Structure formats: C-alpha cells, structure tokens
Image: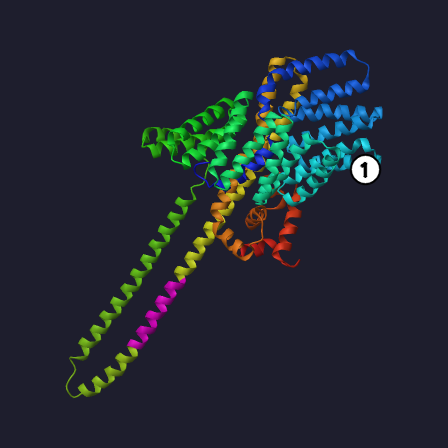
Amino acid sequence: MRHIYTKGESMVRKCSSILFIAVFCSIQISTAQTQSALVDSLNQRISQSSDEAQIIRWKLEIGSSFQQTNPDTLISIAQEAYTMAEQLGDDQLFIESGLLIGRGMIRSGDYTPALAQFNDLLARIDALNNPDHLSFRAEVVRGIGNIYFIQFQQELSLEYYADASAIYEELNDTLRMGSLYDNIASAHLELENFELAEEFYLKALDLHTDNENVMSMASTQVNLALLYDRLQRRDRTVYFATLALNTAKEQNALIMESYAVRILGSVSYQNKDYQSALNYYQRSLEIANELEIPYEQKDSYLNLSRIYEDLGDYKNAYEHYVQHKVFNDSLINQQSANKLAELRAEYETTEQQREIELLEKEQELQSARLISISSGLGSVLLVVLITALFFINKKRKEIELLEKDRIIADSKKRIAEEELANARLREENLQKELTNYALHIVEKNDFLEEVKSEMNEIRTEIKNSGVLKQINKLGSKIYQNLMINKDREEFEIQVEQACDGFFKSLEQQYPNLTNQERRLAALLRLNLSSKEISGILNISPKSVDQSRYRLRKKLDLPKSENLGVFLNQV
C-alpha cells in the first residue's frame, strides 16, 4: 500500500482485494500457538474412537484450524472427511466437507477447481431439496460470489451475494449476514459505487457490533477507513483506522495493525504532521521485518525516506532509500530509456541539418565561379552573354530551389521514418520487457506451487512437531506471496506508466468501461495470450475469455474484427 507516493484511489484499488482475501489473516498470529496442541488432541481422540460420524467432525475441526496457516493441509484433511461422509451416506457431513474443500482451494488460489467444487455442491443440495440445508446453500452461492469477486467479475459476484443475502434474511442469521455485507460493500467499492459501499460497510459494522465479533469489526473499520481516505474525508478515515488499530493491539493481530498504521501514516503525511507519520511508518516497518514480508519492507523504507527528505534529514532519507532499492532493484527505468532515445533523435536531426547547409554553400560557390568567368568575355559578346546568363541564372536558381526542396523533403522524410522506427523500436522493446516480466510472474507462481506441493509431501513424512511448525510457517509465507502477489501490482504499475496515453484515449472514446476492463484492454494490447493473462491475474483462462467477450460487446466490435489489432489502433 503506497500511502505517500500514490493517490488515495490507487491505494484503495490495490488494498480492497487484499483485505477481501485476507480479512481474518491477523487472527493467525494469536492462534498459531494453540493450533498444534488442538491438532494433537483431536488426533488422539480420532485414534481412540470408532464413531465414524464423530471422526469426520473432528477431521473437519482439524482441517479448519489450518485455514489461515496451510490451505493445502486443510484440503487434504477435508478430502478424507469428504470421502468418509460419502461412504457413510451422511448428506450434512458430506456438504460440510465439500464446503471446506472449496474454501481451501480459494485460499490456495485454485479458483477453477474451487468453482467446480461449489457448483457440484449446489447441484447436490438442490437435488436433496432439504429445508435443513438452506444455510449450506447460502454458503455455497456466497463462495461462488467470492470467486467471481477475486476474478474481477464484481457484477456477477453481486448476483450470487444477493441470492445468499435472501437466505440469511429468511433464517435471521445476522452473524453471516454481517460478513456478507462486507463482501457486498467491497464489490461496490471495486465498481466505484461509493455510496452503496459505505451503506453496506456500515450495515456490516452494526451487525458485527451486535454480535460482538471483535476482529470482524476491526476489518470492517479498516475497509471504511480506506473508503473515506479515497473520498478525502480525513476525519472519518482517522476515526475508523484508530478503532481498528486499538483492536489489533488488544488482539495482537500484527497484519491488521500494519493496515491501520499505514492508513494513519498516510493521513498524517497529507496533514504535514511528519513526526506522527514517521512514527506510524516506523511501526509498519517493524511489523514487516518481524513477519518478513519483502514488499511491505520495500514500501515502508520508501515512505520513511520521503518523510526524512521533507524533514531535511537527508542522511536518513538516503539510507532508507538505499534499503528500498535493495528490495526494488528490478523496476524498469523507462524514463531514462526514453530520454536516451530523445537525445539520439535530436543528434540525428542536427547532423541532417548540417548536411543541407553544406550543400547550399557549395552551390553558392559554384554560382560565384560562373559569374567570374563570364565577366572576362569581350564587350562584343557582353549583351549576348548577359541575356544568356540571365536565362541560365534564372533556370539554375529554379533548379537549385527544386533541388533544395527535394533535399529538405528527403531529409524530413528520412527523419520522420527514423523517428517512427525509433518509436516502434521503443514500443517493441517495452512490449518485450513487459511480456518477459509477465512470464516471470507466471513462472514464479508455478515455482511456488511446485514448492508447496513438495512441502506437502515432506510434511506427511515428518513426525517432529518443531520441524513441522517451521515447514508450516514457510508454507504460510508461500501462500501469502501467492495470494497478495505484489509482482502483479508492480507489473500493473509498469503497464499504467507505459500505456498512459492509451488509457486516456480509451476513456475518451469508451467512458463506460470499468477499471477491470481497461486493465484487460491494456494486457490484450501487449499481445498477451489468455493463458498468460490468466497467469498474471491468477484466474482461469476461461474467465479471461469471458472478460474478453464482455469487452468486445462494450466496444461494439463485429466478430470478424481482431480485438488486439483494434486496441493497438485506439
């Protein structure tokens, strides 16, 4: 979250999806110490019991305990319960196990199989037509809505949220309704429906308060602070961020505390209260260092460097900026590349102008020689020569003017062609760099998925609880890296910088496009395939194809016209 050096709306756009996915991740800090003891206790009970239904319930409880720390372990345990429940013929336990599997898949970023899992469950519930399963149906359709939200299909997610909301209202389930209101508000925020986002966040906060759900209250308060920061309502921003900060400190929820202090640091900086901003961002850096989150360390160092610079403490500003560069040395210096290209073009233009001036001087010297020779002729031929020279000189000047015009026209044409070639070369190089960076993101995520899989295999063979805890901690860090995916944010920054003119032109011609559709258009303009785009956005290729179809409809393109070619002409 770049509170100091980006606009508020950019900060909200980047943070809202993260908070949606990791809204309860701060609970992990306070529950990790008791997780191992809980798992050991339940495994001991399972080994001593012959009641299959009770064993399934205990397995679901164990799986749920890994929801924040290790979703792969959650899926594995839930799959065991799922199979047992199906063999036992217990519909309720079967549905509960299937729900837990789908949630684990979402946590792991496996959205396509998660969507298939939820759709299968929904078909099973509808076929059973049991009134006692109504609550399960709401959870399933809400899970589908969550997947569409993460895949930037907010309009579709709201349709499923409305279905779940009707069921919760019928059941008077205020606890789940409060959480669902948070989801609905976040979807409206992504669609820039600010009044509706505020309305549902406040409804969610009221229900969380009535149910005394402390951490849910804090997460909603952070979301409200982000919303009000985007709307430039600083008093409300500070009010809700402070409430969330107090709760985070009481619950020892470090990640929640990090969100709150960065929001307060941003507001303090905007108010030129540099000392307060310094304190907030130093605390943000402490949390980032403690949790070993590199992208938060990078941002914290840069924020602190800017504050020290404004305070005139250039030594500290320099030292913190150096630390920022350590974490951020892969960014492309496009401004320097453009400046070099401009200097090269200017040099070439100057050289061409000098060639034209030399040609003109040489032609003037030739004219002077002809005049000198003609003056030595006799008086008898003077009149004839003068007449002849008059017509010759006139013709010569016409030829010289035509020749100068031709040289100038050729030079201008050559300069224009070279400028066009340089521009095309810059664009091709930029596209290659952005494409390589996109492939780097896909390769990195594939590598992390492979590491996760290998760690899961190792985990089943390790009996030492201390080593197992360390492996789970590594798995959690890999999971957080996959979920939050800062490489994708840095890639989006580079695309926004490189395609600034394209975005302006697109907004003028098609003002009804959403932010997600504009981002997709920029990626298509870079000639990225659906598979590459799905790897960058961490969604399925099918979802990319659906988004492309909706984009074509809004652009009113006939089927015969290529979408990528059209976007490159905007």
Please tell me whether residue 134 belongs to the stretch shown in magenta: no
- As drawn, is 87 to the left or to the right of 437? right
> Relative to residue 304, is residue 394 depicted above or below?
below
- As drawn, is 266 to the left or to the right of 392? right
User: What residue is drawn where x is 78% and y is 11%?
Assistant: 48
Q: How many marks?
A: 1
Q: Which residue occupies the foreground of this view, 290 or 284?
A: 284
User: What residue is drawn where x is 58% and y is 19%?
Assistant: 30
Residue 94 quadrant: top right
Residue that mark 1 sits on: 126
Measuring from the top left, give residue 6's x and y in whole percent: 46, 40
Measuring from the top left, give residue 448's x and y in whole percent: 59, 30
Under circle 1, the secondary element is: helix
Residue 153 visible in the picture: no
Residue 113 quadrant: top right
Q: Which residue occupies the foreground of this view, 277 or 145?
A: 277
Measuring from the top left, give residue 387's x and y in whole percent: 23, 86
Identify the main secondary structure in magenta. Answer: helix
Residue 36 visible in the picture: yes
Q: Which residue occupies the foreground of this view, 513 or 325?
A: 513
> Relative to residue 564, is residue 286 depicted above or below?
above
Residue type at mark 1: give it.
Asp
- Scheme of image coloration: rainbow
> Relative to residue 349, is residue 246 depicted above or below?
above
Please tell me whether residue 407 belongs to the stretch shown in magenta: yes
Measuring from the top left, give residue 500's x and y in whole percent: 48, 49
User: What residue is drawn where x is 81% and y is 30%?
Assistant: 132
Magenta residues span 397-413
Label 1 CA crowd tier, 10 Å (few <14, some 14–19, many 20+): few
Q: Which residue occupies the foreground of this view, 458 or 38?
A: 38
